[in-house]
Structure formats: C-alpha cells, structure tokens
Amino acid sequence: MKNLGYYNGKIGLIEEMSVPMTDRAFYFGDGVYDAVMCRNNIPYLLDEHIDRFYHNCNRLSIVVELSKSELFSTICSLVRMVEGEEKFVYFHASRGNALRAHSAMPKNGSLCIMITEQKMGDIRLKMNTILVPDIRYELCDIKTLNLLPSVLVAQRASIDGADEAIFQRNGIITEGSHSNVSIISNGKIITAPSDCHILPGVTRAHLIKEARSIGIMVEERPYTIEELLEADEVLITSSSKMLRGVATIDGEGVGGKNPELLARLQAIMMDNYLSYTSA
Ligand code: PDD
C-alpha cells in the first residue's frame, strides 16, 4: 500500500478511511497522539514513544483497549504493509465515541494510526525559523490533539518562507511549534526545563544523554531570547527532523559558531538511528 490508515481495527488507504462523527477527536480534540520515524520497517524508539503515549492517556483517563505490547506489535505489523524505506508513523487515541457533550465519558477510547512514506532528509541542512509569542496553555507537556496555536504559528512560518516557529513566553524560549529548541553556548548545551511549558521530546532526551556521554555539559534551565540570538548554535530536535541546526531567526543569521560540536552530535544521533533501524 502507498499509505495506511487504521481506525479501531479497520484498515485502508488513508484517503478512503472515514471516522464516525461521534469521535471526540473530531469536535473536541479530546485525545493524545505520538509519532515515530520508521526505517526498514523498524519503528525507531517505539517503546519510548509508546510509554509517553500511555502516560498521556492515563493523565487524561483515556482508555486504550490495546495493551502497550499489543500496540507495539500492531504498529510493527502495519508498517510492513506500506511501501518505502523510511516512513512516519502517527498514532492517536481519542476519548472515544459519544454524542457531543463536554462531560461525556465513553468507556473505551478510539485508536487511529496513520503511516505514510517520509524521509528524514539531510539533517545537515539548517532551518529557517521565526520567533513568536507562546500563546499556549499550561498543559504543553501533554501531547494533545489540540494544536491550534502550533498550527497557526507553523502556518505563519510557512507563509514567511521559514521551516519552524520558535515560541517565547515572556522573553523565555520554550520550544518550537512541533519540535524542541536548545542552544549550544560556550561548549555547553542549554535546553528549557521539562515542565508544563514544553513537550518532553524523546529526541531531546536522547540529545541530552548523548551529549553527556561525550562529556558535554547540559543545563536544563530557562534561557532568554538574547541567549538564543547570541548562541553558538541553535538546535532543533524532533522525531522527524532528528537534530538540525538553525540558520536564521526572523531572517537574521544565528549560530554557526560551533559547527564541529553540532556535526559531532548529529553524527552520533544519526549513527544510532541507522544502527537501530538496520535491517
Ligand atoms: N512533534 N515539541 C512539540 C510541541 C512537538 O510537537 C514535538 C514533536 C516535539 C519533539 O518531540 P519528539 O522528539 O518526541 O518527536 C517537541 C511531532 C513530531 C509532530 O507533531 O509531528
């Protein structure tokens, strides 16, 4: 198949699948999601993404009928049905199906999975970004389906010819519209603390781990717009982009002052990806 959609056990091409109007994802965005890259039919770090997914479901009392290991094996068998060497696997659970009422609590959630061909691309290509006010709420650590602010700023970035929007809240950098943002400064990595204002990214966690393993200090602390603009390198991490440097913010050049460390971290992370997913 060229892509695959799954909804509560039904499978088909995404364009041909449909979702009942009673699904609470449809009118409330009442659900959570996760996403992984997949190469050679091996979803990368799927266990970590599944752990975060169930953690988020539990926080919102969303019941997924499949166990963690059942979801793991379902995804692993579905990816084999889709053509392509590299794929993106998106999965979400909504609270389930019920007539529209804010307070409705259906017994079981609904599970949706989408698999499309997607390449990681050349991670050495730097990204262009814009800086925008963080207009989101205090639950950014939950990977909710409610992404309106992120969608709006990502669209703004795209209109401006940029690849990503970086959120700032009262002068403090939080994260990207669909990525985490960190900086390299004086040989150290500085990244926003894992609190209710950022998603605890799986890729961010791996960056921290790999950097520490080669003796690079990592500070998890709030950092300012000024620190971002003056950083030696600005880093974007996400499952689909891995680790990318930033070339510009609002059209002005940033970073580019420690390309050796950026390239070293990228090489380590890419090696992990390639060896984990080698057939
Ligand atoms: N986005 N922060 C936000 C707001 C995100 O949406 C994402 C991921 C990340 C990075 O998380 P991870 O390293 O676990 O992918 C941080 C996914 C890829 C998306 O929405 O498509």
Image (cartoon, rainbow, N blue to C red):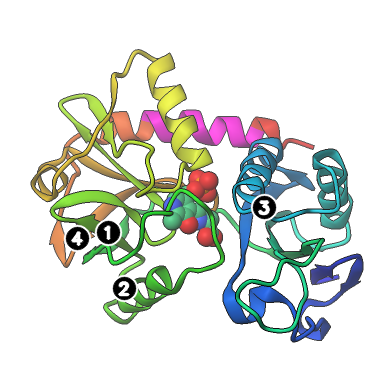
Q: Look at mark 4 in the image and give the residue it sits on.
A: 249
Image depth: mark 3 or mark 4 in front: 3
> Residue 121: in sight, yes or no?
no
Q: Tell me if residue 8 is in the magenta stretch.
A: no
Please report contact status of discs 3 and 1: CB closer than 8 Å, yes or no. Answer: no
Question: What is the magenta range?
Answer: 264-274
Closer to us: 135 or 117: 135
- Disc 2 versus disc 4: distance between alpha carbons? 10 Å
Which is more N-terminal, label 2 or label 1?
2
Which percent across, then down, holds residue 174?
29, 50
**Secondary structure state at the residue bearing disc 4:** strand
Please report contact status of discs 2 and 3: CB closer than 8 Å, yes or no. Answer: no
Q: Look at mark 2 in the image and give the residue it sits on.
A: 157
Binning the other alpha carbons within 10 Å of mark 4 as few (below 14), some (14 to 19) or many (20 upward) gives many
**Secondary structure state at the residue bearing disc 3:** loop
Mark 4 CB within 8 Å of ligand 1: no
